[in-house]
Image: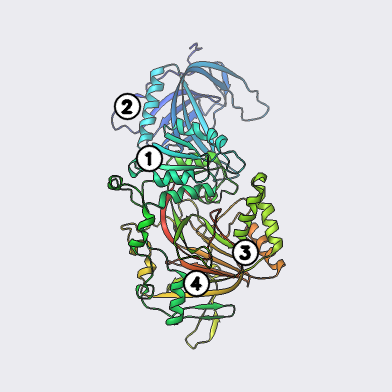
Amino acid sequence: MEREGNDCDVGDTSLTASLFDGEASVLSSTFLLDHVGEVTVTFHSDRLYWKLVGSLDNDISTCLRVKYFPKAATEIKLSEIYAVELNGHGSIYISSLPPAPECLLLGQDIQMYRFTVHGFIRSKNQPSQCILADYTFGHTNLQVCRKWVNQLNASLKQEVGRPKNLLVFVHPRSGKGNGCRTWEAVAPIFSRARVETKVIVTERAGEAFDVMSSITNMELNSYDGVVAVGGDGFFNEILNGFLSPRFKAPYPPTPSDFVHVAKDNGDSLVNDEDEIVAETSSKMEDQFPLISSPKQFGSRISNLNSEDKAAEFPVPNEWFRFGIIPAGSTDAIVICTTGTRDPITSALHIVLGKRVHLDIAQVVRWKMTPSSEVEPNVRYAASFSGYGFYGDVITESEKYRWMGPTRYDYAGTMVFLKHRSYEAEIAYLDVESDEINLTSKRDYQGNLIRAIRSSQISERRICRTNCNVCNEKPNHASVGVCSLTPHLNSEETRWARSKGHFLSVGAAVISCRNEKASDGLVADAHLSDGFLHLILIRDCPHASYLWHLTQLTRRGGSPLNFKFVEHHKLLQTPAFTFTSSGDESVWNVDGEIFQAHQLSAQVFRGLVSMFASGPEV
């Protein structure tokens, strides 16, 4: 390369020798940074940083006949780098960086060997959103570029948790039908990061479930995780296909069990409009003899052959993770786990090996209709299960699929105008704890007193990156009844029952934030705290229900602070049962229709892991 005088030495390698000497922790060389100028680049064990070459005593430094001004050092952490590539010979554009608008901008292209560091920066307006950032460095010596690339890639390989092999499902018609285009937009990130992907573009409903439920444990063990390119419903399909044949746990109590206890023993808590009666029951094993045994699970656990069963795939699994690249209509799970609805951000969370645990609800339908035989059918939910208004909206929206995501707005309006309520009975299980979650209880004299809801007596703790609540590691030492369903062995159990006419019955596992409701259904719900938020909306005047829905859409709103709203934050032993009466709606389980006359549910803390780190706040 032609140079004038001794202004700078881009080819200087005197500082690079120590980089490759065994345990050396610092590497430094001089490069030309594309669109910037000559920089001194230094690599420590956890970051790469650079600054413009030139004396800080002088306002201007000259190199290659180009004038530029020094600026503050720039850096990128190793944890923010997802790939480093050698680009070969090509152009490096050098520009001046004037500190004032009146200074002229001069520049030129220089031909040299290059390598690019691929990373990201945070959006200033949306801290959770990641913006791709590429830094291309040039040098006259190809070997210097190769040594830096090799050293940086060797350090990236030591980053813990980054995936190497993924199974990817793409829903081509998800949301606005952009599933394939969304994958094509993020696929280069995976190839640059050297992540092998097996891509399956689904051609029919239920295909992802069939693949996940029939895939052998041996093949599943060859992947670091599964990625869904689609919406919440598509992820739910994949999740159910994964868990249905592999996850073994007792069913939650059935509605008939609760009725039997209430009638025979009187050990129940009844919430019928105006009255609540509380008593403490004995051990649950004695009172619920119909809780499913391992034998009852036999027909639904797995159709895998005996040879594959030898290749174990434990659930919960600390190493195997799920990822979602948003391409759906709502994408609430992505917003809750990454803080934004952005495919690039989700792809970066995946290739960088982020990890957060996620609670999963097990929803068991006992009877489809009042006249049906008892036949357990299991669904798993990662975000929300709703009956009444939420079920009617999903049913109505199916008529208008041609409208795309806007069909939910139209269907929601139509259902709201009908203002239908449904008669039902809901029983929920609670355990004596320091935190009061019941709406009311009796004092020692037997007089009825109102207890302040937990949302009003404790400060909201919003789930975020490095959340103290979610980072408390779930106890997965064993997958037995004691570790997954602690309420089955609790010394002190408490049951409550609410019955009447309800506009909706909902069970939220996470906050369910979305672009229409920035705080979600339950603002202080966490990704992995073992809570299930039971929300009962009793029949009320049309205007009151509209005000409730309006509060849902407001940041900092109080949608649960209404007399007709019951919010039960079930602690440690989150289980409830449901029985409908009269005209029936359907359940909306993570955006999928689930018809049930009798149903029960429980949540398992941190059952699966996600390629995510929670929202930045």
Which numbered disc, 4 or 1, marks the residue that appears first in the sequence?
Answer: 1
Which residue matches tag 2?
Answer: 20
The answer to the question of whether label 4 and label 1 lie on touching residues, with beta carbons closer than 8 A, is no
Left or right of 258 on screen, residue 125 = right
Classed neighbour count for the residue bearing mark 3: other residues with Cα under 10 Å, few (<14), some (14–19), many (≥20):
many
Q: Is residue 74 visible?
A: no
* Mark 4, residue position: 427
Contact between labelled residues 1 and 3, with CB atoms less than 8 Å apart: no
Decide which of 562, 71 is in the foreground and name it.
562
Q: Secondary structure at mark 2?
A: helix
Please, what secondary structure does the residue beneath circle 1 have? loop
Label 4 residue SS: strand
* Mark pair 3, 4: CA separation: 22 Å
Closer to the camera, 317 or 264? 264
How many angstroms separate mark 3 from mark 1 (CA)?
42 Å
Figure quadrant of residue 100: top right
Name the front one of labels 2 and 4.
4
Nearer-N-terminus badge (2/4): 2
Look at 38% across and 70% down and name the residue there: 290
**Secondary-structure class at tag 3:** loop
User: How far, Cα to Cα, is label 4 from label 1?
Assistant: 41 Å
In the displayed structure, would residue 7 be above or below residue 439?
above
Specify the label residue 172 is tagged with: none
Q: Which residue is mark 3?
A: 559
Camera-near label (3 vs 1) is 1
Residue bearing mark 1: 223
Number of marks in the image?
4
Give the x, y percent position of residue 137.
Answer: 48, 24
Q: Say whether marks 2 and 4 touch (CB < 8 Å).
A: no
Name, please, the residue furthest toward the bottom.
445
Identified by mark 1, the residue type is: Tyr
